[in-house]
Image: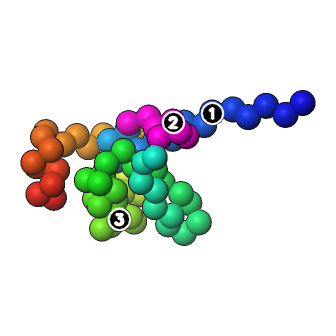
Amino acid sequence: MLFRTKRAHLDPICGMRLSSEQNGLTYTYIGQEYHFCSQACYDLFRRSPEYYIALLAHDDRGHCGIRFPSESVAQAI
């Protein structure tokens, strides 16, 4: 018998956990798929994926820990 497990994804920018059922944004870079909770996190990563991948390589949390103070600031980025 085959059981499917729910797979959680971690937004590499802010660290929000996303379930596989959530329709978050995804971006594939050099064969690796990244999942994002918001357009702001997606846009930030997409502008400079090498920079954020380098940060992730040196962070044991699995994300960069960036927090947006408000939606208006996130939209300005």
Label 1 crowding class (10 Å Cα cut-off): few <14, some 14-19, many 20+?
few
User: Which quadrant holds residue 45?
Assistant: bottom left
In the rendered image, which residue does mark 1 sit on? 6
Report how far apart the C-alphas of labels 1 and 3 lie in the structure. Answer: 26 Å
Residue placed most toward the observer, 7 or 29: 7
Name the mark nearer the viewer: 3 or 2. Answer: 2
Front of the two marks 1 and 3: 1
Residue 8 locus on image (x, y percent): 54, 36
Residue 67 at x, y percent in the picture: 22, 40
Pointer 3 residue: 46
Q: Are marks 2 and 1 in contact (CB under 8 Å)?
A: yes
Which structural element holds mark 2?
A: strand
Residue under pointer 2: 19
Quarter of the picture holding the N terminus: top right
Region in magenta = 16-22
How far across and down, in percent of the image, does residue 3 sit? 79, 31
In magenta segment, residue 63: no
Is residue 56 visible in the rendered image? The answer is no
* Mark 3–mark 2 distance (CA, rounded to whole Å): 21 Å
Query: Can you say whether 29 is above or below 55 in the image?
Result: below
